[in-house]
Amino acid sequence: SKPNSARGSKTGWAKYTQIKCIGTGAFGSIWLVDGNAHEGGSAGKFVCKQVHVANLNKKELKDAVNEVYILQMLEHPNIIDYLDHFVDSEGYLNIVMEYCAGGDLNELIVEQRKGGNTNYFTEHQVVYLSFQLLQALKYLHGIKVLHRDLKPGNVLLADKGRIKICDFGISKRLTETVHAQTVVG
C-alpha cells in the first residue's frame, strides 16, 4: 500500500536530510536524501526530485502535479516507488521516491562505449531487460497510463539487474472515451 502524502504537513523536510545533488534537469534537480525515521519518515536513502514551482509556466506546473498524481497510483516492481511529496517554504515541489544506486540505462550504455565495447549487453541481459520493460508497459497500459517519454535515461538500474521506469512528468492517463493522439518528443 502507498504511503500517505505529506502535502500540507509541517513535517516535509523534517522527515529528510539532503545529502547531495545527484542530477539536474530542465525543471529542477534530483537530490539524494536520507530518511529521518525518528521524525516520522522512512529510514534509508531516497531521491527527491525538486521543482521550483515559481519558475514553471502553466503547462509545466500541470505536468509536475500530474507526475505526483500518476506516481501515487502506480505499484509495480519495475516502476519507481513513490514515497512522499510536499511543497517547502522556498516554493519547491519535492517528490520523494526510491533510490536506485545503479544509475540509469543511458549511463550504462555510455560507459560501455567509453571502453570501446560494441556488444553492450549479452543476449541474456537483453532478454531480461526487455522482459522487465514489457511487464512494466503492460501494467501501465492496463491501467490506461501512457509514459510518453520512455528512453534509456528514464530506465533506472536497481538491485540484482532489476530495472525501474521513472519520470512520469509528461505521462497521460486515458479515459474510456479518449485515445492518445498527441505526438511528444
Image (cartoon, rainbow, N blue to C red):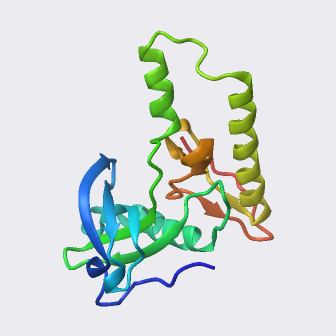
| 134 displayed left or right of 34 | right
User: For the point 46% across and 83% down, which residue is it?
Assistant: 5
Residue 116 in sight here: yes
Quadrant showing the N terminus:
bottom right
x, y percent for residue 164: 59, 51
| 129 displayed left or right of 109 | right
Front-most of 157 and 136?
A: 157
Q: Quick one: which residue is furthest to the left in this view?
A: 90
Quadrant showing the C terminus:
top right
Residue 149 in sight here: no
User: For the point 49% across and 33% down, which residue is it?
Assistant: 106
x, y percent for residue 26: 33, 48
Whether residue 14 is situated above or below residue 25 in the rendered picture: below
Q: Which quadrant of the view contains residue 69?
A: bottom right
Front-most of 165 and 32?
A: 32
Whether residue 115 is situated above or below residue 158 in the rendered picture: above
Front-most of 80 and 180?
A: 80
User: For the point 38% across and 80% down, which residue is it?
Assistant: 41
User: For the point 32% across and 57% down, which residue is it?
Assistant: 32
Front-most of 93 and 117?
A: 117
Whether residue 118 is situated above or below residue 158 in the rendered picture: above
| 3 displayed left or right of 48 | right
Whether residue 75 is situated above or below residue 28 in the rendered picture: below
